[in-house]
Amino acid sequence: MRLLLLIFAFLTNTHCFSQENQYVEIAVLNSGSFTVHKVIDKGYGDYRFETATKPWPVSFDGEANKVTSVLIKRAGIIDEKYEIDLPGFPAYYVNATSGICVSAIDGKLYYYTYSIKSGSTIAYILSSKSPGKYEVEKKILDDYRSEMKKLQVDAREDRIEENNAIAEKEARENSLEGKAIQSINFKLVNAPSDIGMLTIVSIGIECTLADGTILKTKNLGGKTPYTDFDFEVKGGDYAGGDFKVASDSRKIPNDKIEIIGWSKFDAKKVKGSFSLKLNYKSDIFYQYQGKGGASGRGMTVGYSVHGGNGTDGKSVKVAANTQSSNGESIIKLVITDAYSGEVLAEAKINAKSKVTINVSGGNGGNGEVGTSNYGGDGGNGGDGGNGGDVYLTGNAVGMLNIEVLQVGGRAGAGGKGKTTVNTSGTNGSSGSKGNLYN
Amino acid sequence: MKKITTALTLGTFFLFSIGANAQLGKLKDKISGSGSGSSGKTEKTSGGSGKQYKFEDPTGISGTYYTSEQIIDRQNTIGWLFTKEKDGKIINNLYVELGGKGYGDRPNSVQFSLKEKYKTKYGFNYFYLTDKDCPGLVNNNHKFVFMEIAENTYAFAEEDKVICVAMKDVADFSTYDKETAQVLYDQNMVKINEEAIAKVTEEWMANEVYSKNVKKVVFSNQWYNLQKQGYANKIGVDGKNFKTELDMAGNMNFMAFFDAPPAVKYPGQQINIEYEMNGVKANREELRKSSAAWSNMVPILETKDFNYHQSSVRAIREYNQYQSAYVQDYAAIKVLYENRSQLKEGQTYSFTIRFYTHKDGENGELIAEGVVTLKYTKEAKMAFEGDPAKPTVKGVFKQFADFLEE
């Protein structure tokens, strides 16, 4: 019995897996009906093959020794087509839509999915031969795929080079490098009706070359890189075809956004320009909340770390006054630190738009759970920070659509003791809510 | 053809949902008892033998059904009693008597409900489990359904895996074996799922944050400005905090919006991310394969983990509150490192990020791309080149150089 087991172990561990590519492997098979051995999951990693009652029709397309695609009629009902992975040295046939692969090895047609991390997951083996144990068949298939990957290097590099050459040609055709430029035009991709602070506007670039060719950026349907251009912008930031309007109206001169752009390769610097007036119809928000306290997780020998205290939200004054902009009445906000008087931000909004000011206190950090070998008491929770005060002034306070968030920070929870003889840390205190004055 | 290819996509799920069906054998054994007594081989019904149920209703659904495999040990048939209306109210209830001995003197039985929508839209009966009176199904919360695949013929599926076929006429067993039933079940599920997927995409497209940014990479200085925690399957942000310029001293987060979930559109593939600045490029896959150190630093990304129209939030570099340290994508840091001699305080630089599908060492389709302006502020210079006032604290570039030395 022991001898038999040794022979079996020898056979299963030293099986010779094929190193032939799919052209060779599949050449020994003929189109026709294939007996189907389905994998049945018996649970707990126990997979077995069960022979289905009906054979499936399979046909191989291409030359006899160069099959380029496999057609499987699953259960005789659904057509599934599998295309070769690498014509120079194929390892499998794949259905691009489902990701299912088919490989022929030693007269068996394996039907499976493949993951670089976990290898193959066999669903069926189509063959007149009886399959071995699932683990043995999986190993044969995984070994074959690994071996083929090594042998595919040359063919794959050839294809990568071909693809790179195509990509480089396309890049050259669409790049502005070395090209004489006649004009540059900016175009709104979708003209927004409401445009205010923090709005993101998609703006594309169209470049007419001296020979009349028109090159466009991606957001206008072209392939010219945004990075081929240099810009000067006012009123916000512009990158990747998106203009983000500034969060501070002091950075928006004349209530409009402006872009001047040119090719970074153009010595003559032929320029295009763009400007768009703002109507400030966008909701805006400003965050001046306190910071959360750090959680205690020092794992320090001897004691458990307490949670840090949250900091207080900033107290701010908000002066709201009406102002005219681009022919319309808007509200100008000046937000200052209530104690230092420093101007934190200036904003402009339409009366119908909403402004949110968040001056909530930071949450207290939780105390460390008792884990130390020398002191298993839990750390104390940190206190929550207080919400900041907000003072509203100015002639437009009554018109202002404003939301003020000024709750106190949540108290940090005390860490539990390591054992019942250890004490738990005390919870922190919640911060108090700030006051709103107007 | 389009329907067939879609069928393939969704069929993959059914065919290879081994994980979801890992308990199938155990539960089926539990129900049928084949785990202890039988050899595990398929037991076919014995011709027309088996208990005959005298159930009937005007729709013709009720009656005796023969099963291709015994659901309950030694029971070749099951009895269906369909009740469309009760006490003036439409209930569409299906009582299925499985036979054998259940609790007390009661036979094993289960109750199903008809999904009217599928009958109206697709023309087939679909009954889903609503109640059970069967010891073999205790603690089993799997989805069980009876789906009509032909006249008076139903596929009985657990978690979308057909476990037997039930039919009124035993002659049909030669036509509808389990594998055929699975294919027909999958085809019907494709119809159901196609609509579900279309509905999800429609919902995403209705949101301007998504529709304006499909196939784009977006940026911010905080992860929560890109995606609401725990809501990877929907848009939870208003996009107001997406950034086009980032201070290199702070967090540099990014996220991709896809035209379809890569897990569905590109099954069995990987995701490769490429970074570029001033013509210097680096991508995760090439670096991952270059050394053990890089392999440890850059884990494999597989499409199967990208299940939604947006990726998870990633970072060029960000402060991790829990680890009390910055974490960074070393492929992106390599690009910054190779540009280090050109970085000048106060200057800005275009930085491009591209998401590709990837397989067997080759990039496939470009599925998302974005450009952000990185600002090399005074604080960024200190973070990357080190603070002269704290010579013992290494800057990012020194840390990276040490890594390259490995």
Image (spheres, rainbow, N blue to C red):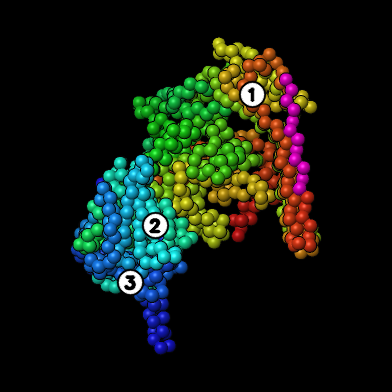
**Amino acid bearing label 3:** Lys
How far from the left and from the top, in percent, is residue B111? 39, 54
Residue pointed to by mark 3:
B41
Q: What secondary structure is marked by label 2?
A: strand
Q: Which residue is mark 2?
A: B110
Q: Quadrant of the C terminus of chain A?
A: top right
Q: Position of residue B73 (x, y in %)?
A: 36, 69
Q: Tell me the residue at 57%/19% (across/down).
A: A352
Tell whether B186 sits left or right of A395: left
- Distance of mark 1 from mark 2, alpha carbons? 57 Å
Q: Tell me the chain of label 3.
A: B
Q: In the image, which residues are magenta?
A: A427-438
* Disc 1 secondary structure class: strand
Check disc 2 and give the amino acid type.
Val
Q: Chain of mark 2?
A: B
What is the secondary structure assignment of the residue under circle 3? loop
Structural distance between the alpha carbons of marks 1 and 3: 71 Å
Disc nearer the start of the sequence (3/2): 3
- Identity, as a three-letter code, of the amino acid under mark 1: Ile
| Residue A193 visible here | yes
Disc nearest the viewer among 1 and 2: 2
| Position above or below: A255 against B116 | above
User: CA separation, marks 3 and 2?
Assistant: 25 Å
Tell me which residue sits at (35%, 75%) in the image. B39
Residue at image mark 1: A402
* Same chain? Circles 1 and 3: no
Query: Could you tell me which quadrant the N terminus of chain A lies in?
Result: bottom left
Q: How many marks?
A: 3
Mark 1 or mark 3, which is nearer to you? 3
Of residue B261 and residue B35, the one placed in the foreground of this image is B35
Residue at 39%, 84% in the rendered image = A7
Q: Is residue A328 magenta?
A: no
